[in-house]
Each structure stands twice: as C-alpha cells, then as structure tokens.
Amino acid sequence: MKLILREDVNKLGDAGDMVEVRAGYGRNYLIPQGKAMMATEGALKQLERMKEKAERRAELTIEAAQDMAERLETTSVTISVSVGEDERIHGSVTNQDVADALDERDITIDKRKISLDQDIKTLGEYTATINLVGEIKPQIKVWVVKQ
C-alpha cells in the first residue's frame, strides 16, 4: 500500500515522503491517526502545493530572523544584581534574566533560545547566544553590574 506521510513517523519517514507499507498498518493505524493519506493523483498534487507554501513560509521566517539578528547584534543588556563579599552575586544570572532584560527593550525572545556561554556568578561582561532559526545565531553583550 502506497501512502504519503502527513507528519514524521519514527523509523518510517518524514512528512511528505511517499512510503510503501503493509495494508493493515496503513489502514488500521497510519490513516485513522491522521499520520498518512492514500497516494492518489489528487493527494500528490495537494502535497506539491503544501510543499510550495511551506517553502514560502520558511523564506519569510528566515528573512524575519535575519532582520532580528541584525537588531540583536547591536544590542547589549545591563542586568543589575545584589552582590556580597568579593563582588560575588547572590545566586546567578540566568537566561530568563537576559530574556526579561531584552523584553524591557521591546525585543521578545523565548528564554529557551538564549544560551549563556558560561555561568554568570560575578560582575562583568558576558556573551549570550540567541538561537533564532537554523544557523542564524546572533550574540549579545550582557553587562552584570552592582545594584
């Protein structure tokens, strides 16, 4: 039985692939779960249209990410923290703190996309990398200062 996968199926294929499976597996699991559809002429044409739309959306996403990357490259954030003896921070500065500081500058970035190059436990200048889309990973300066 020939099917077109609508979504990634483990050990079978990726979304958009045409696969050959046993009739029972396709009829009783893949099709009812919405993971695949029969490979008819109409379905193949629909698949081509869906791929074209996905490519156009991906191009727009990459363009927006490049614009955001240019904006982020020129941005630095300052985070003020309370310190104890020897200028050591109580706790540490996290990616959530960096996301909050960016949000104050009207730049909304999910904290899971921010990675700090090292643990921030003292005052100083650090670098954070933002994972936007694919290989677009701008870096921002993070200044940690005394409150």
Image (tube, grey):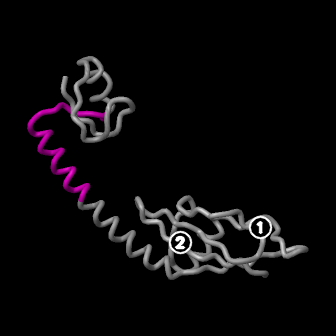
Q: Which residue in the protein does label 2 denote? A: 139
Above or below residue 29? Residue 126 is below
In which quarter of the view is residue 81 placed? bottom right
In which quarter of the view is residue 98 placed? bottom right
Say what secondary structure mark 2 lies in.
Answer: strand
Image coordinates of residue 138 in percent, x first then y, are: 49, 70
Above or below residue 30? Residue 124 is below
Q: Which residues are magenta?
A: 34-55
Q: What amino acid is labelled 1 in the image? A: Lys
Q: Name the residue rendered at 43%, 74% in the picture.
A: 68
Say what secondary structure mark 1 lies in.
Answer: strand
Image coordinates of residue 139 in percent, x first then y, are: 53, 71
Q: What amino acid is labelled 2 in the image? A: Gln
Residue 20 or residue 116, whichever sits in front: 116
The N terminus, quarter of image? top left
Q: Name the residue rendered at 12%, 33% in the picture.
A: 40
- Describe residue 73's horizontal placement relative to residue 58 as left or right: right
Q: Which residue in the protein does label 1 denote? A: 121
Residue 138 or residue 94, whichever sits in front: 138
Image coordinates of residue 82 in percent, x first then y, are: 81, 75
The C terminus, quarter of image? bottom right
- Describe residue 84's horizontal placement relative to residue 102 as left or right: right
Q: Are marks 2 and 1 in contact (CB under 8 Å)?
A: no
Q: Decide which of tag 2 and tag 1 comes sooner along the chain.
A: 1
Image coordinates of residue 24 in percent, x first then y, are: 27, 17
Residue lying at the far left in this picture: please name it: 41
Q: Check disc 1: other Cα within 10 Å, few if <14, some if 14-19, many if 20+.
A: some
